[in-house]
Each structure stands twice: as structure tokens, then as C-alpha cells.
Amino acid sequence: MENKKPKNSAQDAEENKILAAISYLGILCLIPILLKKDSKFVMFHAKQGLVLFIAEVAISFINIIPILGQMIWLAAALIFIVVSVMGIIKAYQGVWWKIPIVSEYAKKIKL
């Protein structure tokens, strides 16, 4: 049997940055969660992606309310798009980027 050395965080980030970036594409956050449980870098981004996805689903229900709900939903959707794009970029760069507020909820997720 071969003795595997634990990966350092830079090596982990470099090898798994594409899967980490996928974490910010809505329900696709489940793919990295299921495929790379052993990667701290992937799980860090996947948990944040999962929290973002849950928030997106939750805020979509406010769209039912005429006018005000739709304006709130539109503003939130734009914020989610910007944060998701930034998350994709940061994950692909190998950066451990903590999304304000979201990262606090992501830390609480045990997978």
C-alpha cells in the first residue's frame, strides 16, 4: 500500500479549482460536494455555493408579491449573479474567498 501524504492547501487549490468554481453555479454546487469530500478547498467553496443556492431559492418566493416583491427579487438576483461570478473567479484563481454573511452560514454546514 502506498502511503499518501496529505495535500497542502496550495496544491489542493491548484488541483481542484475547476470543481470549486462549479460550486457557484446554482444546483451544480452538489456535484463538487458529492465528488470531492476529501478536498478542503472544494468543500469550502461548495458550502458557500450551497448557501447561495438556498438563498436564491428562498428569495425567488418573494417574486410572487406584485411590484415590490419583484423589485426586491430583481435586486437580489443581480447581487447573486455578481457574487457568483466573483466566487467563480476567486475559486479558479485558487483563493479562499469568504463571501460576507454567506461564509458564516457555510461554516455551520457539516458534510
Image (cartoon, grey):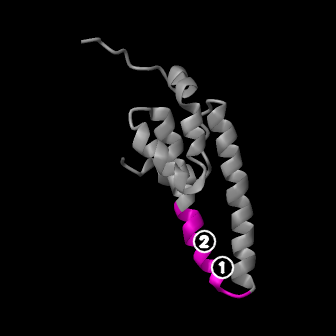
Q: Are marks 2 and 1 in contact (CB under 8 Å)?
A: yes
| Residue 88 sits inside the magenta stretch | no
* Identity, as a three-letter code, of the amino acid under mark 1: Asn
In this image, 68 relative to 49: left or right? right
Q: Which residues are magenta?
A: 54-66
The image quadrant that residue 61 belongs to is bottom right
Query: 87 or 16, which is in the foreground?
Result: 16
Q: Which residue is mark 2?
A: 59
Residue 26 x/y as whole percent: 58, 56
One can see residue 100 in this view: yes
Q: CA distance from mark 2 to mark 1?
A: 7 Å
Residue 39 x/y as whole percent: 44, 32
In this image, 20 relative to 30: left or right? right
Q: Is residue 33 above or below residue 76?
A: above
Q: Which residue is mark 1?
A: 63
Q: Secondary structure at mark 2?
A: helix
The image quadrant that residue 97 belongs to is top right
Residue furthest left as drawn: 1
Residue 19 x/y as whole percent: 54, 37
One can see residue 104 in this view: no
The image quadrant that residue 94 belongs to is top right
In this image, 1 relative to 91: left or right? left
Residue 63 x/y as whole percent: 66, 79
* Identity, as a three-letter code, of the amino acid under mark 2: Ile
Number of marks in the rendered image: 2
Q: Is residue 61 above or below residue 93?
A: below
Q: Residue at x 42, y 39 (%)?
A: 35
| Residue 61 sits inside the magenta stretch | yes
Q: Is residue 77 above or below residue 68?
A: above
- 10 Å crowding of disc 2: few (<14), some (14-19), many (20+): some
